[in-house]
């Protein structure tokens, strides 16, 4: 959700240029209101806190009144209609898919799909809209021309993204902050280390746990890295999987060295398999995108089981779908 809101607010030019898309997508700026349904992620503390801090009103759809979301549901239907024409579509239901081999027919990487989606959205913006009578991009430009005040922009775009990430409260121990069985330290923490009853808000990005962001009592935000800088960046999904494996082995769940040892073990398994199976290569791409482009991509998902004849991950326990609190 943090990434979706960041994308909504930020200028799109650099992103489109990075994809090699020559198109106009001028929509940007802080919204006055975000209309949402009643899904769990829209009622999270991170969503509410981020909206409040940036003066954004959250307007929830009345329960039992789906027609309130008709305009966005129609747009989603239009986009998904195009998506389902791509090779490898899973369709909207098992009934619609029938005996179509989605895995066997799939042909696009996540990077290719991202570029395709950008092209599809910008094409939609440039075509005449039946209800508006003009292209959506023209309607945006006309509305901006009528505004007396300029579009509001966050003064700190990266800080804006961080404000919508999940967070928790933690005491600063004498050896640093402990989160997910991992230890974080920066010299700035010495100001609060060992103070009983003093808890600070710790914000984390599930796609990269190597750095958390600590809010001081005065509201300042400080990046704090792993206390052991030799540790590589990891995702929350990798961490949870490692703890599940340790639990199965009857080992300590908060032994930091064991956690990283298991993650390295799992990565080595996937890296070896990636040269032999398409499914493993796709998982590898998801993992690398999450770790290399924090702030730009979705968190990673599970990988389908490869075919029996080439399944070098046959005894692997699998990967969890990422969930943000």
Image (cartoon, grey):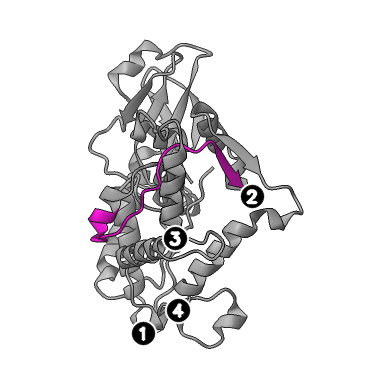
Residue where numbered disc 1 is placed: 309
Q: For the magenta stretch, what is the residue range?
A: 16-39
**Comes first in the chain, label 1 or label 3:** 3
From the image, tell me which residue sits under label 3. Answer: 135
* Residue 99 colored in magenta in the image: no
Q: CA distance from mark 2 to mark 4?
A: 27 Å
Whether residue 5 is visible to the viewer of this picture, yes or no, is no
Q: Is label 1 in a helix, a strand or a loop?
A: helix
**Residue 15 can be seen, yes or no:** yes
Question: The residue tagged with tag 2: helix, strand or loop?
Answer: loop
> Are the residues tagged 3 and 2 within 8 Å (C-beta)?
no
What's the CA distance linking mark 1 and mark 2? 44 Å
The residue at 50%/12% (across/down) is: 196
Q: Residues within 10 Å of mark 4 (few under 14, many from 20)?
A: few
Name the one closer to the observer, 174 or 218: 218
Magenta residues, dominant SS class:
loop
Can you say whether 150 is above or below 133 in the image? Answer: above
Residue at label 2?
37
């Amino acid at each position: 959700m943090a990434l979706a809101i960041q994308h909504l607010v930020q200028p799109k030019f650099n992103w489109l240029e990075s994809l090699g898309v020559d198109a106009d997508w001028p929509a940007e700026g802080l919204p006055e209101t975000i209309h949402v349904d009643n899904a769990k992620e829209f009622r999270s503390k991170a969503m509410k806190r981020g909206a409040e801090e940036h003066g954004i009103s959250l307007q929830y759809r009345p329960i039992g009144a789906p027609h309130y979301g008709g305009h966005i549901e129609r747009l989603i239907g239009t986009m998904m209609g195009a998506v389902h024409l791509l090779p490898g579509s899973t369709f909207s239901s098992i009934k619609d898919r029938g005996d179509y081999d989605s895995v066997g027919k799939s042909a696009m990487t996540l990077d290719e799909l991202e570029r395709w989606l950008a092209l599809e959205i910008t094409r939609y913006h440039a075509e005449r809209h039946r209800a508006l009578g003009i292209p959506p991009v023209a309607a945006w430009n006309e509305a901006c021309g009528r505004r007396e005040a300029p579009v509001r922009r966050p003064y700190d775009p990266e800080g804006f993204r961080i404000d919508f990430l999940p967070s928790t409260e933690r005491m600063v121990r004498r050896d640093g902050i402990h989160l997910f069985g991992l230890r974080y330290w920066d010299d700035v923490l010495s100001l609060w280390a060992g103070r009983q009853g003093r808890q600070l808000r710790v914000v984390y990005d599930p796609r990269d746990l190597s750095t958390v962001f600590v809010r001081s009592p005065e509201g300042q935000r400080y990046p704090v890295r792993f206390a052991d800088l030799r540790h590589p960046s990891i995702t929350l999904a990798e961490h949870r999987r490692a703890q599940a494996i340790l639990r199965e082995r009857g080992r300590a769940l908060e032994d930091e060295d064991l956690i990283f040892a298991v993650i390295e073990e799992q990565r080595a398994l996937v890296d070896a398999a990636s040269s032999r199976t398409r499914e493993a290569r796709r998982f590898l791409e998801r993992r690398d995108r999450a770790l290399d482009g924090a702030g730009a991509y979705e968190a990673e998902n599970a990988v389908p089981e490869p075919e029996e004849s080439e399944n070098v991950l046959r005894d692997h326990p699998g990967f969890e779908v990422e969930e943000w609190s």
